[in-house]
Image (cartoon, grey):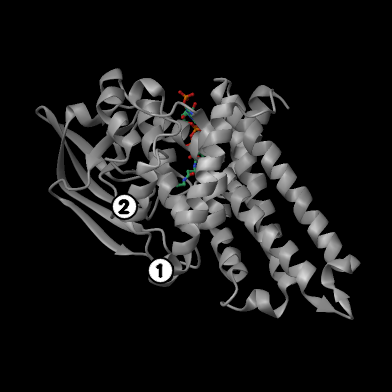
Amino acid sequence: MDLNLSEELVLLRNLAKGFTDERIRPAAAEIEREHRVPRALIDAMAEAGLMGVAVPEEYGGAGLGEMGLCIVMDEITRGDFSVAVTYGAHASIGAMSVLVGGTSAQLKRFLPEMASGKLLGAYALSEAGAGSDPAAMTTTARKDGASWVIDGEKVWITNGDMADIITVFTVTDRERGARGGITAFLVPRESKGVTIGKREEKMGQRGSATVTISFEDVRVSDDNRLGGVGDGFKIAMGTLDRGRLALGANCLGCAREAHAMSVDYATQREAFGKPISDHQAIQWMLADNACDIYTMESLVYRTAWMCDQKRAFGRESAMTKLVCSEALDRVVDRAVQIHGGMGYSAEYKIEQLYRDARVTRIYEGTSEIQRLVIARDVIKRGS
Ligand code: COS
């Protein structure tokens, strides 16, 4: 593995960092206050050329793979987690579901518009009774002539009320379940019969839109069926392998931000006649944060490299998501501790980072599901 970033990836990191400093940071307080990421900010990311980072060049993207996507996620999460999650629902699991499962006609039809940001994507797998066990979903699709008719309800859909095109997973053969019974469709949000519910009020990442979507007799053409009939579960899981990795990069960016704020605070705040960074109790927390961040960084970029090398990376992606989300929780917890009373005040951003971090151990597969994925692979393929 070559640890040097290519010239293109260095330029990409600078671009994402510049965008974060100039556009995301100044907007972050309002995003948190209003519980809304403005579409104009997403459009600005598109103008900056960030929406199709991992889309291959032949389909209009930058062709910088998961390494590129993780670099962008790492940088923009430092500015605001909600913006990064909004971006990720499109650039990671939305567009990547098309890349993972699309036919060659679909890659040509959808990816260029997704890479340019003209079509904003979203990914609809979870249901009220099917979170950790998506094969238990009840949303159905039935063939009717040359089209399909979708009925059911999806929950916790990031970008659900902003997206132009939503990857929806449905049951087409109840008996076969996860093995050939689930089929994915690319459903335009404006389709007749699609109803968007209200936004969830959440503990953290409050700016990102999380909604319920109902489908009532929603008719989509067979051309919008993603991949083959019955391929849906594998497409869902293959996409989540990438999503979990990118989420590790989100955790890394958030941890870096919390750590940088902690170092600044600890070197300025004085107690017992000297900066608190001169006290060993604080030094140990800073050291532990630095170790956690180094671990996260190593896992994220090694796993991204494996994905881009087209090696199997499902176990490694689950390990990255598990370790990074749990490490982030430790980092933000220490960051609050270092900030003392100020860390508990809503006037300091550290309080928001503490809340933003918590869901990373839950969404895109809980820590318990990641352990299950890792253990099954260890048993099947060896340690
Ligand atoms: N890539 C491609 N195919 C995969 C896969 C992957 N990462 N993981 C599983 N599959 C395939 C299996 O190979 C199997 O097919 P074959 O029998 O033909 O080999 C099929 O899918 C069923 O796999 P499995 O038996 O492992 O399915 P389970 O129902 O036991 O589910 C877990 C496995 C629990 C890992 C899965 O349901 C999961 O990830 N749950 C969490 C979902 C989640 O993250 N939700 C969050 C919301 S999405 S934002």
The residue where tag 2 is placed is 160
Residue that label 1 marks: 201
Percent x, y of residue 290? 77, 51
Picture coordinates of residue 45, whole percent (x, y) = 39, 46
Q: Is residue 126 left or right of residue 283?
A: left
Residue at horizontal 54 percent and vertical 52 percent from the top: 77
Q: Is residue 366 above or below residue 264?
A: above
Instruction: Decide if residue 76 is on the left or right side of residue 266.
Output: left
Element assignment for label 2: loop
Q: Quadrant of residue 39?
A: bottom left
Residue under the image location 64 percent in, 25 percent down: 380
Quarter of the C terminus within the rendering: top right
Residue neighbourhood size for the residue with mark 1, other residues' Cα within 10 Å, grouped as few (<14), some (14–19), many (≥20): few
- Is there a contact, CB below 8 Å, between mark 1 and mark 2? no
Q: Quadrant of the N terminus?
A: top right
Is disc 1 placed on a helix, strand or loop?
A: loop
- The residue that appears at 60% across and 71% down in the rendered structure is 351
Determine the residue positioned at 56% across, 77% down.
Answer: 346
- Between disc 1 and disc 2, whose residue precedes? 2
